Image (tube, rainbow, N blue to C red):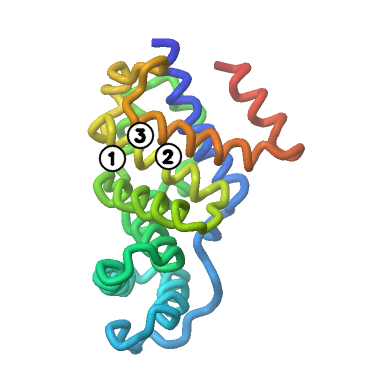
Amino acid sequence: MKQQKCIIYSIFLSIILIVVLGGCQDLFTTGLFNALQTNPENMSADQLVTYGNDVLTTGDEEKMEEVYEVVEDTLEEDPDDPELNYLAANLAAELSGFNDLLDIGNLSSYADDNDALNEIIDIIDTDILAEAAEYYQEADNNGYELNAQDNICCGIGLLLDSIGGDLDNLDTVDIDNPTPEQEEAIEFIEAGIELLSSEEFGGLIESFFASS
């Protein structure tokens, strides 16, 4: 049980740090968007990346879904394109509701309550978040340098997918002998926390785990 609680603390510490670092909606923004009427199906890969990043800034779910479908189709022709994989990951992360967690207040207060944590997790479409994780993996495997938030989102997506999206199943995770997916999930989460563990955030990390 202690090992499973450590995973919970890691997940929600990560989200708390994202809130601190990212503010309200700054995780996946690239600039103002001025061409919502553009048809993404007629774009080159480079144009699609630029357009997709602009769509992300609007918060228009319908447009994001449209671009996501086109990006998925484009990736079938070129599955190793790191920029397209990264765009697909960001779109899927946004569509999954992962960023809605930023609207929740003191997440650390939920860390000892699995039922409350599951209510928070219910905000997320874990299937789409798992897709985001896969695209982050592909981007990473093809040379795209993931930032802290990307690594954490990827890790959480993989971990939740491995336990069916239900924190009550955390007791099935054997830290000493995790499944390959769980091992990779933990590696991504740890990589994200390490990137956030600058002098600025180190004290927060230490105090959070000390309280556990």
- Residue type beneath disc 1: Asp
Q: Please tell me the numbered disc located at residue 17.
A: none
- Quadrant (top left/top right/bottom left/bottom right) for the N terminus: top left
Tell me the residue at 47%/52% (across/down).
Answer: 140
User: In this rendering, is residue 205 above or below 173?
Assistant: below
The residue at the point 24 percent across, 71 percent down is: 73
Q: Are marks 2 and 3 in contact (CB under 8 Å)?
A: yes
Residue at 45% across, 67% down? 83
User: In the image, which disc is placed on residue 155?
Assistant: 2
Percent across and percent down for residue 68 are 30, 68
Q: Which of the 4 image quarters holds residue 113? A: top left
Is 20 left or right of 173, judged from the image as shown?
Answer: right
User: Residue 43 appears at what percent x and percent y?
Assistant: 35, 85
Q: In terms of sequence position, does the residue under pointer 1 or pointer 2 come before the other?
A: 1
Q: Nearer the viewer, residue 141 or 71?
A: 141
Mark 1 to mark 2 CA distance (whole Å): 17 Å
> Which residue is disc 1 drawn over?
122
Nearer to us of marks 1 and 2 is 2
**Residue with the mark numbered 3:** 159
Position of residue 192 measured from the top left corner of the image (x, y, whole percent) = 55, 41
Residue at the extreme top = 1
Q: Please determine whether, in this image, residue 123 is positioned above or below residue 167.
A: below
Q: Nearer the observer, disc 3 or disc 1?
A: 3
Q: Residue at x 34, y 58 (%)?
A: 92
Provide the secondary structure element on which disc 1 rests. Answer: loop
